[in-house]
Amino acid sequence: MAPIDYIERIPNNVSLAENRRLLRALEDWQPKFLEWWHDMGPEGFQSRDVYLRTAVSVDARGWAQFGYVKMPEYRWGIFLAEPEADRRINFGDHQGQPAWQEVPGEYRGTLRRLIVTQGDTEPASVEQQRHLGRTCPSLYDLRNLFQVNVEEGRHLWAMVYLLDAHFGRDGREESEALLQRRSGDHDKPRILGAFNERTPHWLSFFMFCFFTDRDGKYQLASLAESGFDPLSRTCRFMLTEEAHHMFVGETGVGRIVQRACELMREHKTDDVRRYGGIDLATIQKYVNFHCSVSLDLFGSEVSTNAANFYTMGLKGRFEETKKDDDHRLKDGTYPVIGLDGEEIVTRQEPALVSLNERLRDDYIVDCQRGVNRWNEIIKSHGVDFTLTLPHRAFRRAIGAFAEVRVSPDGRVVSQAEWDARHRDWLPTEEDEAYVASLMQPVTERGKMANWIAPPARGINSQAEDFEYVRLT
Ligand SMILES: [Fe+2]
Ligand SMILES: [Fe+2]
């Protein structure tokens, strides 16, 4: 397949130059994207050199090239994973048929909605994170923030490509609308709840990358199974970028945990706030918050929409092709938790309508692996504390538990108990104020804020004092 062409105004590996109509649509959108990036992208660092990686090929080995780039000059473009010869639709009613290279007419509206919903999250997170640069704990972290931001910008390009290439005039209108909604704006909010929350400081940024970008991984992985081949190939390449975002989240929280443990040992106290750390109990509250917000992104436990996406062949299960069943799911059942009065119970539901819950299960297992690694850090410091994921029914706003109060350990509780206890379970205004008070920028080469440990190794094996962002 074509290598990535960086001579073109829009880098791509889809032979864009040969498709004049599409090229014009994207060239028309590009300045609007840049305007959005200037208005809503990272504030205050647009003219700085940042040590970023750029995709140079889409194969697994060596797709990245590192170098200093000013963010507005980042080479956003359109990169699809290699096509699979003779790819088939692997699930649903069209199982066994050749994968679609064009949008199947009867599913046009549904497919467009799926792509727009995914696409909307990409600029949203950039908007949520745009003020964080001012309070970076180190140049290393500042660079990672910007890497995540430019890649979310590229993910937006990926979805806009699909809209412009396959949905004609509607697609172009949706592409414009993706630049017009704003995270947290009452009049024109982003589509999904978690993407309208604030990301006020770096603890919430790292939690967001761990929990919310991981939702992205699972959504992309399901869309990568799609029978609509251009969507599948687009998402497969996006997943390689997403992995870095989760790395930033997991290691970011891990380094805060490590620093808390160091301070606990050094001063023989749990109260590390006195020494400028973020105590483990506070970290647990942020886990509870970000996990519950992200669990909502998977939607209702029982969902006919999810069933339809699957039956239509548009959105599969996580690792669909590795599963050993009929890939139609008309007869099977799946265990789904729900409410029976005040009790949380597990019921067998038809497998097809349970696909959101199944994906949520896969997600929770993955989250738990990361939490286990944080607990290893705690254990290695001889500290007796275990971070846990909150029960999936905790603080949910969507689905079977939206109307009840549930504790992090999974008990349905009264409003009175919730009122008495929620300050122990979720960040309070005092917690927020304390964490915010730590957010003083550290921009000297090789220096780290006191509340976070240094990374185990540099980006692209760079030395500890590497100048990841040139501020002068
Ligand atoms: Fe993304
Ligand atoms: Fe991401």
Image: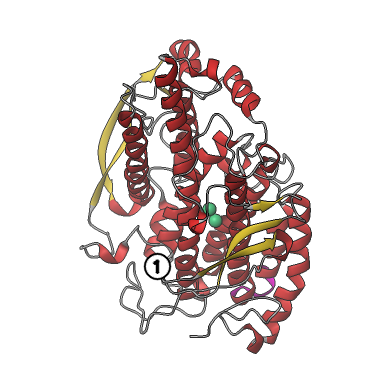
Instruction: List x then y, in percent, for residue 413.
Output: 39, 17
What SS does tag 1 mark?
A: loop
Report the magenta residues as a range: 166-170
How many neighbours does mark 1 have within 10 angstroms: few (below 14), some (14-19), or many (20 or more)?
many
- Counting labels gives 1
Q: Nearer the viewer, residue 352 or 262?
A: 262
Instruction: List x then y, in percent, for residue 82.
Output: 44, 78
Rendered residue at 74%/47% (across/down):
43
The answer to whether residue 435 is visible is yes
Q: Nearer the viewer, residue 300 or 35?
A: 35
Rendered residue at 40%/14% (across/down):
268
Examine the rendered structure and indicate whether residue 147 appears above or below residue 73: above
Instruction: List x then y, in percent, for residue 381.
Output: 34, 28
Examine the rendered structure and indicate whether residue 455 appears above or below residue 278: below
Q: Does 260 appear in magenta?
A: no
Specify the color scheme: secondary structure
Residue to which mark 1 is pinned: 313
